[in-house]
Image (cartoon, rainbow, N blue to C red):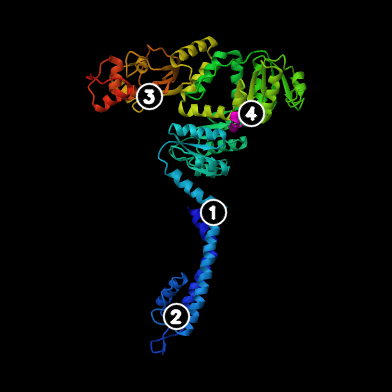
Amino acid sequence: MGSVFFIVLRRMRAPLITLIVIYALSVLGLVLIPGVDASGKPAPPMSFFHAFYFVSYTASTIGFGEIPAAFSDPQRMWATATIYLSVIGWTYSILTILALFSDRGFQQALAASRFRRRVARIAEPFYLICGCGETGGLLIHALDRIDRRCVVVESDEARIVELELEDFRTDAPALVADASQPQTLLLAGLRHPWCRGVLALTNQDAANLAIAAAVRLLNPGMPLLCRAELADTVERMTGFGADYIFNPFEVFGRLLAQALHAPARYRLHRWLTGTPGTRMSTGDDPPPGRWIVCGYGRFGRSVVSWLVRGGMELTLIDPDVKAAPGFRVVAGSGIEEAVLREAGVAEAVGFVAGTDDDINNLSIATAARRLNPELFMVVRQNQQARRELFEAYAPDLAVVPSEIVGHACLALLTTPLLPVFLRQMEQQDDEWARSLLARMRLELGDDVPESWSVRLDAVQAAAADAWLERRASLPLAALLTNPAARESRLACVPLLLRRDCGDHLVPTDSGDLRAGDEILFAGTHGARVRQQLILRNANALAYVLTGRETQSGWLWGWLLGRLGRPPAGAA
C-alpha cells in the first residue's frame, strides 16, 4: 500500500502544487481588494475565513453567490479570474488522476497491493503455485475440487485473466509477476504461517531453478515440488534440496519401459494415477521388439534411454543424422514415406512420434500407421487445447507432459502415501501386480478408483481413536464393512499400512490396527464417504464391530436412512 500512496503523491505533485498556488493567490487577492457596503461606500476587504470559504465553493463551480456582502467591481474582476484559474487547475488535476489510473505501472502496483492484502488475510492451509500454464491450471482446478486453497503467480497476464473468469469454489489470489524474483515469492506468502508448500511449475527450467533456490534460502523448511525437463536442471535442483522433482519425459520413459517388461505393474500404476471415475483403457500393452523413435529432442532422448535399458532394438528419425551417436539415424522429418520405409516401419512393432509440434506428431503418426496399421503408436501431445484432435486419432498411448506432472503433484499433495506405494510396487514381480489388479477390478469394477489415506488419530478418526484408547487394537475389517448393512463390504481395498515408519504392502483384512497407523485405500467415492462415517461416528463404529445398534437421536436415524439402513426400533 505504501508504494501506491507514494506513486500517487509523485504523479500528483505538479497538479497539487498548481491548485495550492491558485487557491493561495485567489484568497490573497480577496483579502487585499476592498469591498463595498450597501450604501455604495468602500468597505474593508474580506477576512481570510470568508475569502477561503468563497474560493472553496467557487473553485468547485458550486457558486452560492456573493457573501458575506455584495462585491465591489474589483472584487468581481478578481472572482472572475479565480473562476477560470480554478477550473483550469481542477481540470489539470482530474486529467492527471485519470491518466494515473490508466497507467500500467500504477495498475500493477494497485494489483500487488490488493494481492498482498488478500494473501495476508488467508487463515487456512494453502499452496503457492508458480506458473499457471497447462500443468498449473490443471492442478489449480483439481485442488479447488477438493477445497484446497492456492495462491498463484504467473508472468502471462492473459492466463491470469482466464483464471479470474473461472468459477472456483475457493478464493485463489493471483498476481501477474515474475515468480523467479525473491520479492515476488515473499509477497505471495512464502513465509506465510499457513503456506504448506511451493510448486515451481513454469515452462522454463531456469525460472523453476531460481524459484527452488529462493525457497530453500528464504524458507528452508518449506516443502518444494519442481518441474524440470533438463538433466542439468534436475541436478542443480537436487543440490538445492528440492523435495520432489518431476521430469515428465523421464517419468513417461520409465513407464514405457515398465509396460514392455512388467505390463501388469504398468496397468496398475496407470489405474491408480488416472482420473477417478473415468473408464480404464483396456488397450493392448506395448509389445517388445523393434521400435522407431521420431524426434531426438528432450522427450526422444528420455524415451530412447529407457528403451535401450529394456533391450529394445531402435531406429531413430531426425533431421540431424549425427544427433545420436551409436544409433541408426535416418535423416528426415518423419512425414515422408520414403524416410519411414528406410527406417523399417513395415517391420517395426512400435512407433514414437515425439517432436515438440502437435500437428507434426499427428502427421507423422498418420503416415506411419498408413504403412503399418499394426504399429503400437505413441504420440506426444504438447497442448491440452488439441485434445479433441488426439482423441479423434486415437493413438495407443498419448503422452501429455502437463498431465503427467499435474497428476504426480496432486498425488503427493492429497495422498502422500500413494507415491510411497508406487515406489514399493516397483520392487514386486509382475505376478504380484497382476493378482492385486485382478482383486481390485473384482471388488471395484473397471472405473479408475479414488485413492485416500487415513491416520488413526483424534483429528481424522475421532471414533476410532476413542476406541483405541480403551483397547489395544482395532480390526482392519471394521473399516471395510458397510455401516448401512454390516453383512456387506465397502468397495475399497487397503494398499499400504504405515506403522512406526515401517510400510506393509496390501495388509490383510484380518490384521489389527493401532493408534497412529496410516492406511492407504483405493475405492469408490461412496465407500470413502461411508468409511469416514465409521471413523468419526462412535455409533457407526460400534455397529460394524458388534452388530448392535446403540440408542441414537433423530439426526443419526436420518443419516442411517440416507445410507440405506433403518435406525434401531424402526418398523
Q: Distance between the residues labelled 4 and 2?
A: 80 Å
Q: Which of labels 3 and 2 is toward the front?
A: 3
Q: Please tell me which of labels 2 and 1 falls first in the chain.
A: 2
Task: Say whether marks 4 and 2 touch (CB < 8 Å).
Answer: no
- The residue where tag 4 is placed is 231
Q: Classify 10 Å Cα crowding around label 4: few (below 14), some (14-19), many (20 and above).
A: few
Residue named by callout 2 = 31
Which residue was labeled with disc 3? 529
Q: Is residue 257 above or below residue 7?
A: above
Badge 4 amino acid:
Ala
Q: In this view, does 552 lie to the left or right of 318?
A: left
Q: What element carries label 3?
A: helix
Percent x, y for residue 422? 51, 19
Q: Decide whether residue 388 is among the magenta residues.
A: yes
User: What range of the chain is rendered magenta?
Assistant: 380-389
Give residue 83's position: percent from left, percent from top.
Answer: 49, 74
Instruction: Give the label, 4 or 2, closer to the camera.
Output: 2
Looking at the image, tell me whether mark 1 or mark 4 is earlier in sequence order.
1
Quadrant in the picture for residue 241: top right
